[in-house]
Image: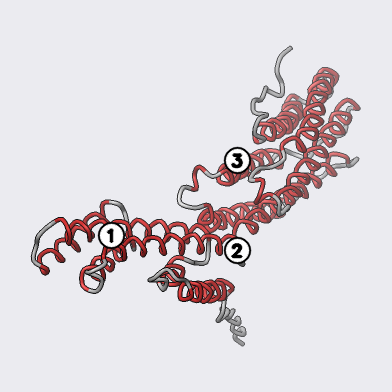
């Protein structure tokens, strides 16, 4: 018997961005028609062409339209006023120049606006082309400003908050995994997780990481025409690097055999390691909480001072871990095999490296030292 076909999710026939476009364009049309300044109908024409589903897309379209309009007005004045050419020749050269300049400037849609201005100004508004061109530029600029304002404040895109939630969910997953590791370290007879479960848990984290990277591409559009210099872009890059490093360190940690609880010095070492994990969990939970705050969109940065106290506590626990590790290795010589002793040292080193990765990920607190530095 064949399986029932999976129902296809229907796309909504009306989106919030469509309602926003209709509302803003309608209000712009009313304002333009009621304004005593002539040619006000170019205001709704601009909002209809520029206002899109995201702020970044609206910014790009607005820049292209403004550059194309300015280029069209300048070429119109040059070819119609400054050069004494026949209509057919002058109009053809002006349109060809518009296409060449548009390609040189990287305009994908702006050159079409420039060509429209040349044709309309030369054939329809020939008597008042100078004032008409200036007024059209003015209405275009106002329309772009209105479109950008609407894209930011009227039913804005949720791409950036969704990305922040995905980062928070990923760090919550890390916290859950580290909590499981801490429980194993505290058990009297620790057992290593089955390989199938380890793989499934790792796959879950990798899927979350890949998912937020895809969401980041959508959120990147919201940052405007030069997103690489935006504070949120730098924050996302730092968080992405931090998450990737945590995955790598945790893979090494999970790859070690189950810990042993004898002799007593080794058990005390595992208890200290569990405390380091507890502090790491608290720090990741605090980071997740800050990422979920809506105020992050206004501050454009994480409150480093709020995380510094947790980080200082964690570094103190790591320093204590070094001391306990030295005592455990000295006390366990002859009681624990060399291979097991290397695994004990490696586990503590990975935890110390995790703390240093966290320290490096927090802006203003960069710099790390080896976990097993010699005294």
Between residue 340 and residue 19, name the one nearer to us. Answer: 19
Q: CA distance from mark 1 to mark 2?
A: 33 Å
Q: Which residue is mark 3?
A: 238
Q: Secondary structure at mark 1?
A: helix
Between residue 34 and residue 222, name the one nearer to us. Answer: 34
Tag nearer the camera, 1 or 2: 1
Q: 223 above or below 13?
A: above
Q: How many marks?
A: 3
Residue drawn at the location 72% of the way across and 53% of the way down: 292
Image mark for residue 156: 2
Q: Position of residue 167 (x, y in %)?
A: 66, 51
Q: Which residue is mark 1?
A: 73
Coloring applied to the structure: secondary structure
Taking the view exactly as shown, the residue that stands out farthest to the top is 375
> Is 305 situated left or right of 137 in this image?
right
Return the disc, 1 or 2, that comes first in the chain's sequence. 1
Screen quadrant of the N terminus = bottom right
Tag nearer the camera, 1 or 3: 1
> Is 45 situated left or right of 110 in this image?
right
Residue drawn at the location 66% of the way across and 30% of the way down: 364
Q: Position of residue 34 (x, y in %)?
A: 48, 75
Q: Quadrant of residue 250?
A: top right
């Amino acid at each position: 018997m064949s399986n029932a076909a999976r129902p296809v999710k229907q796309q909504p026939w009306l989106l919030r961005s469509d309602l926003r476009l209709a509302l803003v364009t309608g209000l712009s049309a009313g304002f333009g028609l009621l304004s005593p300044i002539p040619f006000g109908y170019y205001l709704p024409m601009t909002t209809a062409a520029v206002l899109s589903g995201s702020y970044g897309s609206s910014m790009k379209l607005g820049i292209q339209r403004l550059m194309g309009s300015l280029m069209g007005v300048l070429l119109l004045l040059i070819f119609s006023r400054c050069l004494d050419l026949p209509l057919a020749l002058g109009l053809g050269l002006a349109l060809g120049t518009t296409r060449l300049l548009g390609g040189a400037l990287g305009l994908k849609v702006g050159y079409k606006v420039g060509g429209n201005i040349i044709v309309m100004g030369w054939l329809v508004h020939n008597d008042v082309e100078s004032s008409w061109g200036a007024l059209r530029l003015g209405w275009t600029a106002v329309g772009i400003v209105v479109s950008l304002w609407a894209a930011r404040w009227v039913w804005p895109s949720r791409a950036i908050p969704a990305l922040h939630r995905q980062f928070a969910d990923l760090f919550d997953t890390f916290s859950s995994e580290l909590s499981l590791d801490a429980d194993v370290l505290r058990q009297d007879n620790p057992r290593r997780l089955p390989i199938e479960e380890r793989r499934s848990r790792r796959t879950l984290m990798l899927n979350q990481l890949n998912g937020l990277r895809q969401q980041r591409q959508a959120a990147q559009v919201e940052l405007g025409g030069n997103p690489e210099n935006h504070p949120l872009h730098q924050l996302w890059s730092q968080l992405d690097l931090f998450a990737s490093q945590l995955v790598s360190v945790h893979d090494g940690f999970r790859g070690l055999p189950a810990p042993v609880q004898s002799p007593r010095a080794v058990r005390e070492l595992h208890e200290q390691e569990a405390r380091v994990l507890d502090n790491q969990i608290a720090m990741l939970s605090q980071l997740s909480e800050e990422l979920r705050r809506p105020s992050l969109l206004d501050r454009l940065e994480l409150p480093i001072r709020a995380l510094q106290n947790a980080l200082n506590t964690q570094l103190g626990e790591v320093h204590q871990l070094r001391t306990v590790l030295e005592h455990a290795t000295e006390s366990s010589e002859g009681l624990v095999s060399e291979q097991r002793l290397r695994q004990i040292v490696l586990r503590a080193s990975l935890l110390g490296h995790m703390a240093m990765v966290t320290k490096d990920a927090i802006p203003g607190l960069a710099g790390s030292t080896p976990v097993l530095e010699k005294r």
